[in-house]
Image (spheres, rainbow, N blue to C red):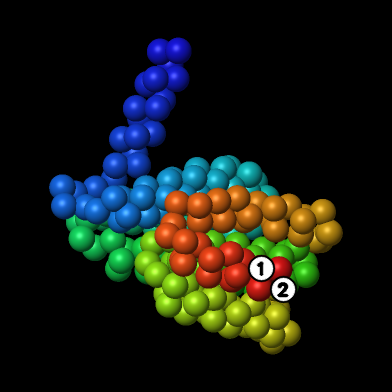
Amino acid sequence: MGAMARARRIWEYLLSIGSYPAESDIQRGKRRIIVGMSILFLVLNTLAVLDLLGSGRGWLIATSLWTAAHILGSLIALRLKPNWFAGIFNLLFLFSFLVVLAETILQGGIQPTSGEILWGLLSVLGALVAFNVRAGLAYFIGFCVNVTAAAILPNWIEPLYIVEGSAGDLTFNIIAVYPAASACSQLPAATRSVTTRVWVWCF
C-alpha cells in the first residue's frame, strides 16, 4: 500500500509539470492530459529504442532517440516556462507529424509499415485537447496532407529498410492510438462532440 501511495505521489508530481497559481480548472485539466500523454510516449519511445538496438536500423533508432529527446525537452521547457504551453506543444505535435512521415518513408510506405502513419492522429487529438476545435481541425488537415505524402513520396525515394507488414500489425496500430480518445471525456461538451466526429472521420 505504501508503494502505491508513493507511486501516486510521483505521478501527481509529474502531472504538475507546467502548473502555475492562476491556472484555471479547464486549463489544468488540459495540461494534465497532455503532460500525461507526453510522459507515456516518452516511455514508449525509450522502449522502442531498446527494441531496435542491434537491428541495424540506425536511422530508426535515431528518430526514436530524437523523439524521446524532444518530448523530454518539451517537459523541461514547460516546467521552466509554463506560459509557453501553446508554443511548446505546437512544436511537439508538428515534430510528431514529421517523425512518423520520415519513418514511413524510410521503411517503404504506408502498407509495409502497417499504417504507422496513423500515429499522427495523436497530434490531432492532442491539439483538440490542448487548444481548441479550430486547432484540431487544422491538425486534421495536416494529418491528411501527411498521409498523402506518405503514400506518394515512397514512389520516388528508395527505402532504407524493408519490413513486412501484416493486417495484425495494422489492427494493433489502430487499437494503440484509440485510447487517447478517452481524454475527450474531460473536455467541454461542444469540443468533445467535434473531437468524436474527427475521430470517426479518421476511420
Task: Report the front residue among 35 and 27.
Answer: 27
Q: Image quadrant of residue 119?
A: bottom right
Q: Which residue is mark 2?
A: 109
Task: Report the front residue among 52 and 31.
Answer: 31
Q: Residue at x 73, y 84 (%)?
A: 155
| Circle 2 crowding by C-alpha within 10 Å: few under 14, some 14–19, many from 20 | many
Residue 145 visible: yes
* Residue 200 image label: 1
Kind of element beneath mark 2: loop
The x, y position of residue 1, in whole percent, is 45, 12
Q: Residue furthest top?
A: 1
Residue 126 visible: no
Q: Image quadrant of residue 148?
A: bottom right
Whole-Å distance between the Cαs marked 1 and 2?
Answer: 24 Å
Q: Name the residue type under label 1.
A: Val
Q: Is residue 31 left or right of residue 126?
A: left
The x, y position of residue 166, in whole percent, is 83, 59
Q: Name the residue type under label 2.
A: Gly
Q: Residue at x 73, y 52 (%)?
A: 172
The x, y position of residue 80, in whole percent, is 20, 52
